[in-house]
Amino acid sequence: MNTQAAISQIIEDGYSVVDGIIPGDRVGAVRDEIIEVQQRNHERTEAEFAKIRARGHRIGAKGVAALRQVINETQCFAPWIADRKIMEVVEAFFGPHSRISCTDCVLNHPGNERGYWHADWPYNQTNASHIPTPYPDALLHLSTIWMLTRFSAESGGTLILPGSHRRLENPSDGNLDGVDRDSPHPDEIQVEGSAGSVLLYDSRLWHAVAPNESSESRVALIIRYAPWWLNLNPTIKGKPEHDAIVVETGGKNYEMEPLRREVFDGLPDEVKPLYRHCVLK
Ligand SMILES: O=C(O)CCC(=O)C(=O)O
């Protein structure tokens, strides 16, 4: 799919899959490194996950493991973060000077449970910092999911509801009449793609974690691109808006750890501008 077709599909349907961003002969090594780093850094107990689920975390479904700001632990995927095919889409929506607001990894282990319908920050209504409904009908944040293993119906390719990005609300907090956020939707589809492909979507798009019915973990990176004018401070630990909106209210939020200085210094030149808003002094 060329860039213009991807942009048109995101406007129309809310999502698009761009193939071959990480080359086939490199993606296996990236996947292995992500698995190793996630397991080394974040062996969460089931009790910890139960606590996360209870607070409504979007990827807190049983059997899903994650590591926030994985780029602080490995930069093996950095050569592709600012790939021109991705940045052409980002720039078409936001112009220059965009920023990255999230760099997490997720491992959906065989047998993981289904997650709930939600949209991403700043639209997820379970987050302390969220845009109240009804939303303005504009693309304000672009989410991407990088497939490090094949996404299919069997492996738990992300469940999405095409066209839902134009809705002025979503069921994340469980209060949307007529929608059970935990149940299948008659119009849902599953994203498919080979390892190395990237799903790009309007962050308003309703989506959910799908059960992985294969025998291998489904491995992915979650990277989000924001325009310079979207205030990311409520998501960044240590910023005054994060203190006021999240810490002092005891709320749950999407939270981003700042990059360590030496990690930032080692990034490719074209990637640095995407992170310079969020680096430890
Ligand atoms: O891993 C997936 O398929 C979905 C992840 C997700 O729901 C999210 O990042 O908000």
Image (tube, rainbow, N blue to C red):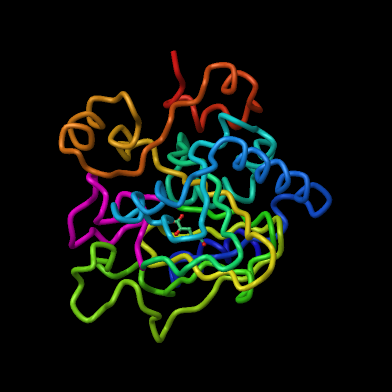
Q: Quadrant of the N terminus?
A: bottom right
Q: Residue furthest top?
A: 281
- Residue 195, how many percent across, how many down? 71, 59
In this rendering, is residue 18 above or below 260?
below
Q: Residue at x 28, y 52 (%)?
A: 55
Q: Is residue 260 above or below residue 191?
A: above
Q: Position of residue 12 (x, y in %)?
A: 44, 71
Residue beneath the point at 46% across and 44% down? 225
Most extreme residue toward the bottom is: 186
Nearest the viewer among 264 and 109 is: 109
Q: Nearer the viewer, residue 15 or 65?
A: 65
Q: Is residue 165 left or right of residue 23?
A: left
Which quadrant is the C terminus positioned in?
top left
Highlighted magenta segment, given as a residue range: 117-142
Tell me if 134 is positioned left or right of 93 in this view. Answer: left
Quadrant of the image occupied by residue 162: bottom left
> How many numbered discs?
0
Residue 204 left/right relative to 131: right
Residue at 60% x, 58% y is: 3
Q: Residue 205, percent across and down?
A: 39, 65
The stretch drawn in magenta includes residue 131: yes
With respect to residue 167, does 267 lie above or below? above
At x 70% / y 55%, what residue is drawn? 196
Of residue 63 and residue 102, the one placed in the foreground of this image is 63
- Residue 231 at x, y = what percent? 30, 36
Residue 255 versus residue 132 in the image, above or below: above
